Image (cartoon, rainbow, N blue to C red):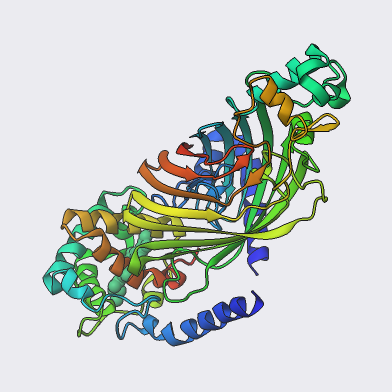
Amino acid sequence: MKSTLRNIVISGAIALATTNSAFAQTGQTRTLPGLDSDALEQWGGEEGIRNWVESLFYYIMLDNRINHIFREFGNIERQIFLNTQLEQLVLGGDVEYQGASMEAAHADLGITVTQFNAVVEAAYNACERINVTYEACNQLIAALAPYERVIVTK
Amino acid sequence: MVIKNLFSRRTASALLLTAASATGSQLASAELFNTGKVLATGGVSMIDGAGGGGITPWATITGYATRDGINGDVHYTYANLPNYALNSLGVAVGFWDRFELSYTKQILTTGSTFNTVGLVTDTTSSAGGGAAGEATTAGGEGDESTNPGIEPFNTTIKMDVYGAKIRVFGEAIYDSDNLIPQVAIGAFYKDNENTDLLKTLKANKAKDWEAYISATKIFFPINTLINITARYTSANQTGLTGFGGPDGNEKEIRPEISIAYLLRKDTAIGMEWAQHGDNLTGESVQLGSVDATEAGPALQATGLGGLSGTLTQDESDWYDAFIAYFPSKNLSITAAYAMLGNITITPEQHGFYLSLQASF
Ligand code: HEM
């Protein structure tokens, strides 16, 4: 009992240490368990991702809990462009992300976990809108979820 | 640090509340009331009233509040078993996704289970000698100390369950890049009203507490939630048949596991297992000063022998297979098939379970 608990903590610590790189947006997010090797294909590649990002912002701008933040501080066109890069990258795509780090991009926004979750709900709605399966959708949810630690600052 | 955070949050909210009560309650509800969790991630209500699965408390905090506020729910659960029907009705509130409080009233009607025993005790005690034989000594009508707590018909067990849970560390949802689960510790205080019946069943106590530690994690890449709980308890059938047995009231650690597969953002299916104890296993039913096994011939003679072949008690681990559907953040519907095995003197207690949770 004690040693299994210690093992969990140790493997968790190793996992933390090895996945810090995810925050530099240089590659696929190392989730545990890992993402499907064909995760990006399940999404229909770059075009599928761009369709999703566009519908994501459609649902975000319809949500009165959060649209005011994007209206005031956002740049929708730039965010669609950069998110299309980022989402491919975290699913294992061979692309370059040219935007700011998640920490830097959201540092001054004072985003709450309630607002973060509103974006998650928009993400699921967008998956349904573009007919990506729930299972494929969860690959991206898993790949983006760890950013909550740096995006939510309030 | 977490604790400090929690307290500053609480103080801030308390201040807000005070300020709001001066300026009108509208503000208070806007600041404190929160339904910011993602659909289904508040879990459902387990039969003891805590946030969790069906029979096991999870490390998640009940309701839809994030750490930005408060949210509560009411639940009603009905389980229909061959010899019993369990009704559980309760209320729970989650505070800042940090701790939860719950109260649940459980009402277990025993159907035909104890009717025969109740009839026999009634009959044998009023019939005097004759066929009743030794069991007559069990009668003692009107004598409180030997009342078996069993009515000829519709013996009902009622229990109040008070629960509290605090989240200690970890992230069940967001930290998909590590294996550290969300961990919470909690406790129940259970007060079973049927002291006479529990005496008959030879339980050591009618009121007792139990404590648990739960670890919960969602693995999005495989659409799966796993919860592991260790409950420190001496309960017999979660306390519905009391705590401890003739050998005393020693608590022990019993494991419980829930596994849920997320089918859609609003639907999950899964299975649960909860280990149960054996405090009363092999014990017969105590009718006043006489063991029911000794009354066996009397039961046969009165034509009531075929109750279940035996009056020896037994207890099995609990299992269930469930489907939970969340049409909105205001409602969840859980249907399950519960496999509870032996309950007191009745075997094969398997049946359907329906639980509704309304969040407000
Ligand atoms: C995992 C979730 C999220 C991801 C992957 C994400 C991704 C991004 C990206 C790629 C950018 C562009 C950075 C740049 O301009 O260089 C950005 C900017 C921004 N994000 Fe997010 N974001 C997330 C969550 C949120 C949430 C929850 C909110 C608010 C509710 C939010 C609000 C904004 C705003 C307002 C900007 C523009 C900031 C600026 O241009 O100064 N984001 N985000």
Residue in the foreground of this view, choosing between B158 and B266: B158
- Residue B96 location, x and y as percent? 57, 53
Residue B153 as seen in the image, left or right of residue A127: right
Ligand 1, what quadrant? bottom left
Above or below residue B134? Residue A114 is: below
Where's the N terminus of chain A, which quadrant? bottom right
Is A61 left, or right, of B80 in this rendering?
Answer: left
Observer able to see residue A141 = yes
Up/down of B39 relative to B81, above or below: below
**Residue B125 picture location, percent across and down:** 80, 17
**B122 up-or-down from A60: above or below:** above
Quarter residue B201 falls in: top right
Q: Quadrant of residue A38?
A: bottom left
Looking at the picture, how far across and down is residue B124, in whole percent?
77, 18
Q: At 24% across and 82% down in the image, what residue appears?
A: A98
In this rendering, position of residue A111 left or right of residue B153: left
- For residue B218, what is the image quadrant? bottom left
Does residue B19 appear anywhere in the picture?
A: no
A138 or B314, nearer to the observer: B314
* Residue at x-position 24% and y-position 71%: A83
